Image (cartoon, grey):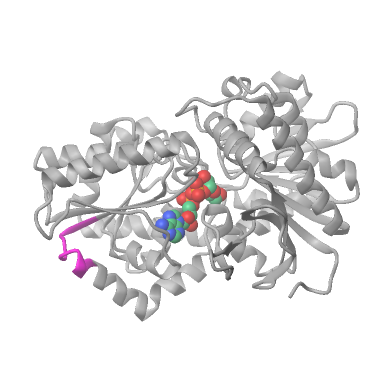
Amino acid sequence: MPSERSTYDLVIAANRLPVDRVTADDGTVEIRRSPGGLVTAMESVMRDHDGAWVGWAGETGDAPEPFDDGGIHLHPVGLSAEDVAFYYEGFSNDTLWPIYHDVIVPASFHRDWWQAYQRVNQRFAEAVAALAAPGATVWVHDYQLQLVPAMLRRLRPDVRIGWFDHIPFPPVELFAQLPWRSQLLEGLLGADFLGFQRQADARNFVRACRQLLQARTKRDLVHVEGSSRTVRAAAIPISVDFKGLERLAKQPEVMARSAQIRESLGNPKVLMLGVDRLDYTKGIRHRLKAYEELLVEGRFSPPDVTLVQVATPSRERVGAYRTLRGEIEQTVGRINGEYSRIGAPAVHYLHHSYPREEMAALFQAADVMLVTPLRDGMNLVAKEYVTCRHDLGGALVLSEFTGAWHELHQAFACNPHDIEGLKQAMVRAVNTPAKDRQRIMQALRRRVSDHDVQRWAARYLAALRSAPERPRLEQVADAPAAPDPQAAEASPDPVVAP
Ligand code: ADQ
């Protein structure tokens, strides 16, 4: 049942609602949690606020009626089959996503995709405008909705508008390739405050405004031409619900399940784990290559060492994702054909979504967590892994190209493009004495526990309230500067076979 209220003091707009309504062939409707990092993070924040969430419900056609779930008012926005193909799979995931992730695959530019992107952003803006109470706070999320801030400001100049970028913001040299670059910047400048994962992302945005719009800028501020408005752009790195997830990981059933997982894998000496959406940004191919070479060289061998790779289905109608899936499955097949023994596969490949309890059990079972993206806004998996390791066990191998690395620099750092270096980081994670690994894990956990998702949301909302001034809270809580990646790479530990 939808709530009786018609307007809300806090309204979230994100491409997807936190739950999907899935209609089965027999017509029965099931409510299913949507995948991905944004939902994971915002769900726990919204539980503490009495707000509304505007987003797509995951099926094409007319929007279903608004409904309430878990204390949140959910307001679906309808997308036609063409909207999904052009706005979502096309412009969002085949134009913006590659440009914002270092063009790991080439971006496609189509004018009809851009038309759809504008049309759908306008639909979101109108839905938010209708739900926001006078003077409400509106928090818009991510790259799919970059035009919403300016569209909403035209409809509702009374509301306070924030936008948060969950993915990287590219250097101006890449951003400038977009034929619609000025419109995107102007869309974002409709907000009062723009939040990014890293300081480098915020700086890239300010620089793009200066170079492409000739906007006047000063440090983290952009002056909006032809108005008296100034917009602030700053880094507020996202995090996980540390307390909630740790509590889950401490449940006896989850811990028992973790032991059971290890046992069903034949109690390997070293269990390595990868958990990613099946996305070319996540560096799954590089990880498999490094692992395969370690098997070839005899430094790792099953059943002593095994790798579980969970690759969640993602964007399966976009060509680059289909190609990637084929490549990964072929590589896993080759590795297993060559190095598995009966009952002891070298790679366990799982292409499913799992409940949170199962994910927590997997994290606890893994001796080494491999997080090797080529580019990633944050990477919540890295933070979830350390949160679940209340036993101080395990080791995190972490790519320097994730936002997470800027906070978790005690992890075993790697550059996934450097296969030799990646192999060394994997071997180092295995061979570092348990006491040292525990010390590292303790430091990583302290960081995530001090900077959890509740603090992220509080900092974001405080920054939005005081923008363009800085809030006092945020000055206290700024992320520490990361060390020089070259220096981290320059101190390798000895490579010893496990
Ligand atoms: P994503 O690219 O989706 O997020 P990530 O941050 O790792 O990446 O979040 C993935 C989430 O999905 C995690 O909570 C993870 O536990 C969950 N998950 C993954 N595989 C799963 C499976 N098989 N079953 C169940 N759950 C699974 C985007 C950006 C990131 C940024 C987040 C949040 O790309 O850089 O960290 O948003 O801002």
Q: In the picture provided, is 392 more to the left or to the right than 6?
A: left
Instruction: Tell me: residue 109, above or below residue 267.
Output: above
Instruction: Tell me: residue 256, above or below residue 105.
Output: below
Q: In the picture provided, is 5 more to the left or to the right than 290?
A: right
Whether residue 57 appears in magenta in the rendering, the answer is no
Q: Residue at x 19, y 69 (%)?
A: 263
Residue 388 % position (x, y):
39, 65
Judging depth in this view, the residue of 63 and 206 nearest the camera is 63
Residue 147 % position (x, y):
75, 38
Judging depth in this view, the residue of 335 and 103 nearest the camera is 335
Q: Residue at x 58, y 30 (%)?
A: 95
Whether residue 263 appears in magenta in the rendering, the answer is yes
Residue segment shown in magenta: 262-271
Can residue 17 be seen by looking at this rendering? Answer: yes
Can residue 472 be seen by looking at this rendering? Answer: no
Quadrant in the picture for residue 290: top left
How many marks are shown on the rendered structure?
A: 0
Instruction: Tell me: residue 367, above or below residue 295.
Output: below
- Taking the view exactly as shown, the residue that stands out farthest to the bottom is 252
